[in-house]
Image (cartoon, grey):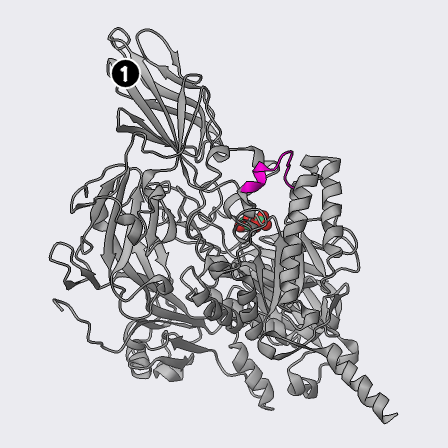
Amino acid sequence: MAAAGSLSFLLFALTIFVFGDGGIWASATNVTYDQRALIIDGKRRILVSGAIHYPRAVPEMWEDLILKAKDGGLDAIETYVFWDRHEPSPGTYNFEGRYDLPKFLKLVQKAGLYVILRIGPYACAEWNFGGFPVWLLDIPGIHFRTNNEPFKRRMQSFVKKVVNLMKEHKLFAPQGGPIILAQIENEYGNIEWSFGAPGKQYMLWAANMARGLDIGVPWIMCQQSDAPEYIINTCNGYYCDGWMPNAANKPKMWTEDWSGWFGSWGEPVPHRPVEDLAFAVARFFERRGSLQNYYMYFGGTNFGRTSGGPYITTSYDYDSPIDEYGQLRQPKWGHLANLHKVLKICEEALVGGDLRYISLGRMQEAHVYSNAERESSLATVLENNLFACVAFLANIDATSSASVTFNGNVYILPPWSVSILPDCKQVVYNTAQVISQSATLRMEASRLQRRDLASNGSLVSYPAKISGALVWEAYKEPVRVWGGKILKTKHLLEQISVTKDTTDYLWYRSSLQVSPEDLLDATPVIEIESMRDVVHIFVNGELAGSTNTKNVGLYAKATQPVNLNAGDNEIDILSVTVGLQNYGAFFETWGAGIRGPVLVRGLATGVRNLTNQLWKHEIGVKGEALKLYTREGAETVTWVPNSLTTSQPLVWYKGQFDAPEGDEPVALDLGGMGKGLVWVNGKSLGRYWPAFRAPQNGCSQKCDYRGPYGPSKCVTGCGQPSQQWYHIPRAWLEPTGNFLVLFEEIGGDISNIQIVTRSTNSVCSYISDAYPPPVSMWLEHINSKETHKKLTTPMLELQCPTGNLITDIKFASYGNPQGACGSFKKGSCHAESTLLVVKQACMGQESCSLTLSWKTFGVNPCPGLSKSLAVEAICRPPASDIFIGDM
Ligand code: GAL
């Protein structure tokens, strides 16, 4: 008996524990669900997740990003899997470097977070071709994302590959890994109808194929209201509180809560106010939501040619809580972190309590979760901070605040906001009252050191602001045939079928004979009836002009006035893709390049049609073929030092720079450049296009968080380049002699290029006595057993980035200050003593705090009125010995 007993114990232990990576015992996790929530190891859970796409950062950044997400109160990290990069050619796989998915997931596990793995393998994600490998187009008879055997075969093989890899690394929850959910397809429901019956058949095939892979955790499909019963359908959008899953036994989950929006060339930069984002999240959990994922929590960078399109910028910052450079975006990160804390306190009631709806007014409502069996007693609270009664009071009026009565108490609800009462009494969080600190950031020209090519390679240090601190050398890319692979035809070829997307560039080359009679009173114009995305038209080696199709249509017309000579004229058109299509039914059929017809109008003798004459299609540009962006490649041509610095099309530039001191993130300021590609130490930072500016209009001074959000609501940078700065990951830099190369297509001013560092300029805090106390203070208060006393007044907290001290107080006012961080102003009520008091408390400190009370300032500047406190403090590293001059 005893022996049998120990054997069953051993078997029990083996079922619960499995070896994790590196021989660590990891416990097997059981994941199921019911109508209320995911059930993890028998417990229903409220889960907050955030998207971090591993290749949009470098592996050296991963752990820090994950830990910042954890600090922000996240339970899980969500990512797509990027098929095109993992299977660069059929049957050849790459899971290295930025594509080391198992490594990324293990770091998530190490941090104690879960993973939501969106295998797709269609991703969308503003990723090149939606994540599909371009070689799929070469498969005879293929049609994407429909009931098509060749497509399904390749899709299944990749999905299996990923699932097997995850199993090999023991990454699924039942194996002791972090993956608790997996997604098949992506938002297929949005386009399923376009495919008719085969669309539905494909969706069911995909669902069933996924189920057959036996991963031991639930599968999800987003935006798929007809998902079969064994798949959980989920919601994507700016708001998902009014949405419900398609069956009563499925939990309500939100896979994409867009924390901002992506950037596009030629457009201003979108921002989503945190008050609205927090409102959307709170409303979701208020109305029975159980899992919510920020898309994106960290957006990052579309390095290389990974950005989708067309016209997606290299930055994929997304206005997310962690910015493109891996720094906290405040107050977004902090305000959401506070929300997550409160939601966690409420978890038990949210997943277990009965939900009651109470109307509080025309546009005001309460949702109350209460657990009758588990009466909210102080003892329960003290034990584990769990409450048996939780209330959400919402005011969905987008203009006015409202006074409501709930449980006999009166509450003031700001417009478009939700108050959370974890004990159904005390407001601990209001989505519109941002207590969390905010910051102003600056891109500071760094003190550059560089090897001065002009003065025998000695190391010279330059003060930051000297333009031209980088010494440039140039190489002119040939406009005429350069020796690349050429396809000759008597018609125009579709671009992707020719380049296979190995490059953005395809030359369409032809010629035009004109007689002196043709040119009599002529105003010749080359007209391309249908082209995408960009063409640069050269005639006799000179750039006549460029056209892009942004804001016009997928394909559009290019109309280019040109100068022609009597005799033979060389026509060289450089067609450029700016990220392959990533969204839409049938997008694989849309193609790229010049469709024609190509006409010459304005000649005295009538219209000439060039469409069916001889065209030479030359793939790519010479400098790319020679890999001029690598040191070795650069040796293969002769560079011209210190010349060609005036704006000219088709020029390669190279220079060297030493890494800026410190560890702040580094970027390249390309504000004065035209359009092209940029590399550092052989690694592509991505496309740049500062010449394509956002329209002058559409930006407003102030962003009003109230009311439904859309991407054009709160934009900045009107009249500016859509992207001026380009992230250079520190991990890609050597201390000295970094090799910087640009390929400029249309001409730019390289003397303005600067290496900059991104640092916190100042930190700000604003609190008002109408605001709830910080969650932590409230919990302390509850635990203090002195709940009969009035809850302590709000407290203002300031915190510099690690290693920085408060060196100055730029603004401080106790009274009714107005404005936002960086532009605070005194109001009609102001205590003169504020600056002195704040200076005394904060100067020379890394952090400081002040209680919001007249006693702190020794005066009450306007008795009887509600007051607030606003402070802006300058943070700087302690004085360092920055070197300027020769070394
Ligand atoms: C969704 C899609 C995501 C992303 C997002 C916009 O429709 O599922 O992959 O493209 O839109 O950023």
Q: Is residue 136 magenta?
A: yes
Q: Which of 860 and 571 lies nearest the eye of the viewer?
A: 571
Say above or below: 598 vs 157.
above
Q: Main secondary structure of the magenta part?
A: loop
Secondary element under disc 1, as helix, strand or loop, is: strand
Which residue is rendered at x = 52% and y = 40% of the image? 581
Q: Left or right: 704 with respect to 523?
A: right
**The magenta segment:** 135-145
> Which residue appears farthest toward the right when viewing the image?
1
Q: Which of 886 and 34 lies nearest the eye of the viewer?
A: 886
Q: Position of residue 243 (x, y in %)?
A: 69, 53
Q: Amino acid at mark 1?
A: Asp
Q: Position of residue 272 (x, y in %)?
A: 48, 55
Say above or below: 448 vs 237.
below
Q: Position of residue 705 (x, y in %)?
A: 49, 56
Decide if residue 408 is in sight here. Answer: no
Figure quadrant of residue 44: bottom right
Q: Is residue 887 magenta?
A: no
The residue labelled by disc 1 is: 568
Figure quadrant of residue 854: bottom left
